[in-house]
Amino acid sequence: MQVLKEEIRDKILQIAAQEFLEKGFQSSSTREIAARVNISKGNLYNYFSSKENLFNALLSAFYQEFNSFLKQLWAHETGENFTLENVEWMARTVAEFIQEHRQEFILIMDKSEGTKYAGFKKETITMLQNHFEKNLKAIYKSRSGSETSIMQIIATNFLEALLSISKNCLNNDQVIDNLELYLKYHIQGVTQFY
């Protein structure tokens, strides 16, 4: 009977994360992951029964944590006045979360095609869209409700900006600076830059 070793399991997860980040779930192979870990493919399956199981091991805890984080982040009063301090707090909070979970965020949002998480990005955009629409309706009660298209665009742009910052910023200071600028723009509009 094969004795499973924690350090091998951890190395499999580390190498699998790199492989999935480089190639995405669909283009990654367990054969390549096993070779990079320096174990047989059969031995890899002693630790993880499938490529899907391996991907899920990387993301299941993050999936729950990210959903909780978003609910907490958006739990403010409708129409709340966003002061500069509020924007800076939100930027730091989001930046710290993304910095801590950068790999998982990129994997779930951009590399999960072919997994049970493939629709998560769209679900997140819909959740953001609904949040924005709820706030818009509360603030502007006379609105016709025809703003769904623009709210979907704003929500998509918001999430894509977070993803781009996650992929392209090299350190926490860059993440915070870029998120702060983006959130200021997002919340206060483009006029602040003129």
Image (cartoon, grey):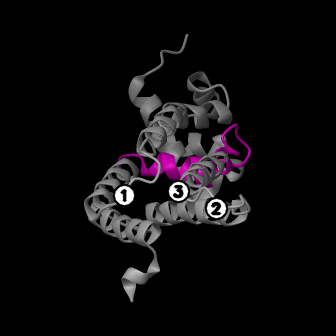
> For residue 147, which quarter of the picture?
bottom right
Q: Residues within 10 Å of mark 1 (few under 14, many from 20)?
A: few
Please name the amino acid that badge 1 sits on: Asn
- Residue positioned 35% across, 47% down in the render: 100
| 108 is within the stretch colored magenta | yes
Q: Which residues are magenta?
A: 100-122
Name the foreground residue: 139 vs 133: 139
User: Residue 116 appears at what percent x and percent y?
Assistant: 70, 37
Name the foreground residue: 54 vs 5: 54
Please name the amino acid that badge 2 sits on: Met
Nearest to N terminus: mark 1 or mark 2: 1
Residue furthest to the top in view is 1
- From mark 1 to mark 2, how far is it between C-alphas? 19 Å
> For residue 192, which quarter of the picture?
bottom left
Mark 2 lies on residue: 151
Examine the rendering and report whether any part of residue 86 can be seen: yes
User: Residue 69 appears at what percent x and percent y?
Assistant: 44, 40
Judged by depth in the image, the label closer to the viewer, 2 or 3, is 3
Mark 3 lies on residue: 139
Instruction: Answer with left or right where residue 121 lies relative to residue 187.
Output: right
Instruction: Look at the numbered disc 3 and give the secondary structure of its residue.
Output: helix
Mark 1 lies on residue: 81
- Residue positioned 39% across, 89% down in the render: 194
Instruction: Look at the numbered disc 1 and give the secondary structure of its residue.
Output: loop
Residue furthest to the bottom in view is 194
Reply above or below: 118 against 164: above
| 9 is within the stretch colored magenta | no
Examine the rendering and report whether any part of residue 12 can be seen: no
